[in-house]
Image (cartoon, coloured by chain):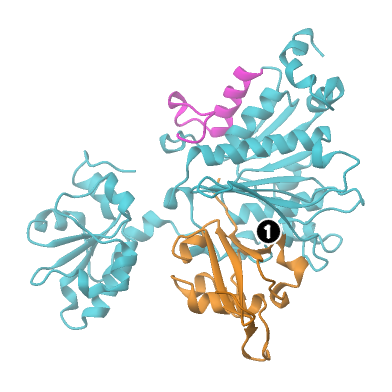
Amino acid sequence: MEDEKTITVKLVFGGGVEVLFSNKRNQSITIPAQAPASGSHPSRPADLRYLILWMSESLLTDRKELFVDGETVRPGILVLVNDTDWELEGELDYELQKGDEVVFISTLHGG
Amino acid sequence: MPLEDYKRYGRQMILEDFGLPAQLKLRNARVLVIGAGGLGCPALQYLAAAGIGTIGIVDPDEVDVSNLHRQVLHTSLRQGWPKVLSAKAAIESINPAVHVIPHITSLNSTNAFPVISSYDIVLDCTDNPPTRYLISDACVALDKPLVSGAAIRYDGQLCVYNLPLQSGDRGPCYRCLWPTPPRQEEVGTCEEIGVLGTVTGMIGVLQAQTAIQLIVGLGPYAPNEVGVPTLLIYSALASPMFRSLKIRPKRNDCPACGREGGARELVEKGEYVALCGGMREDLEGSGKRKGQGRVGVKELEARRAEVDVLDVRSKEEFSICHLPEAHHVPLNTLLHDPLAQLSPGKDTYVMCKLGNDSQVAARALRDALGSGADRVKDVVGGLRAWSREVDQSFPMY
């Protein structure tokens, strides 16, 4: 399905975040390669900011506030790109590459 | 080292990079385990067996029968004992040479420094966010590595915070990775959402293993290694079950480890409960609160033949026990289309385990109904109240 107008990335959910996405821990999704302008952000190659927006509009099966807070994920959810903390990769501005694996995990407290 | 110990520890001493020096390091080590529950028990069991010289245990609670499926040092006969003393008794039968220091208390901002300061390594085996932030801040202030474990449902996580790096610096602290606590309603407890005993077991054993490696200097913690802060995530249901994730370095703007003295000030201020959204609501208490449209279990008993009883628990909980006449609709299904669940011409009594979800469901039903909403009631105290006040043979979990 992928062509130059779309990009396919792998999503992995854990720590309870999967409950918000049909209880599927692994999903492969194809989104527009170019993010439309939104808010103060012009049209640009798809980045994590766009992925989170797209997920909250098109993939989320539970209440929005359980996943997002403004344009980012809610506190207690950690995002990793190809097994690396997104903070090391530019966070929301990280430009998605074909085949990237993005992990969303929730902090756990039980013991 | 006593002669018998050469035999006792021989199978680990002959390991590559171990030998007598590593065993002596373990014997001289002082490890503090905070929480003697699902994570703490397996961690303590293996730390004791491996020959850690001094082990401190912090826990304010007593052994309850609902702990025993995962808190493997406690026994049926020791129900009601302080967990710390039950764990101490178990450790003494595994390895009497271990010096166990009991701390029958919860950790708080007053005792955190005096309790933690005499140990070399701290294991966070607790179950709530305020204590996790407190332990992390105290470990930053006292410069102790913190082996943090967490587990719930089928999932677990393991991370070493404040890890000494070859550069002389430290890895991130708990606040660096989780700067803002999650909202309280997003924090599930083992009592509310469940936990498999082997999952806390996996993580607790890994905490013990990590502590041993830190003490001895093995693998990623060997003195010639750079030290890469990682978060290990585990899920019994995922494939692969383990993933090791590279996490951020410490944050320069971290209120605890980003500036000199920051962590100490935070511990002294002690505003941990407020940071995490205030005192956690007692779900049994809130389920029993009187209110408009709520009925007691005695009224349910009197009218059960004529009303429609709607049970909104999960299908798993419904499978454990239910009233024979109850009609099962999980809360989420009900919220999705409330009116579809109402039987015409009958009053509806909604119930759940404790009487909290039933209030949410009843409110949704009344809102959807508009007029005639008073035909919807929910049962104060839920099935727990039923099992106490009406039918003592009704199973409760």
Relative height, residue B54 to residue B337 (above, below): above
Residue shown at 44% from the left, 70% from the top: A62
Which residue: 66% across, 38% down? B206
Question: In the rendered view, would you say B188 is above or below A60?
Answer: above
Residue found 74% across the figure and 27% down from its top: B52
Q: To which quarter of the image does residue B144 belong?
A: top right
Numbered disc total: 1
How packed is label 1: few (under 14 Cα within 10 Å), some, or many (20 or more)?
Answer: some
Chain assignment, label 1: B
Which chain identifier belongs to the cyan chain?
B
Q: Write down the region rendered in magenta.
A: B69-95
Q: Which chain is orange?
A: A
Question: Callout 1, which amino acid?
Answer: Gly
Query: Of residues A9 and B263, which is closer to you in this image?
Result: A9
Q: Where's the N terminus of chain B, which quadrant?
A: top right
Q: Look at the picture and state if A7 lies above or below B70.
A: below
Residue A76 lies, in percent from the top left, at 60, 63
Q: Is mark 1 on a helix, strand or loop?
A: loop
Q: Residue B196 placed where, x, y %?
A: 47, 42
Q: Position of residue B207 (x, y in %)?
A: 67, 39
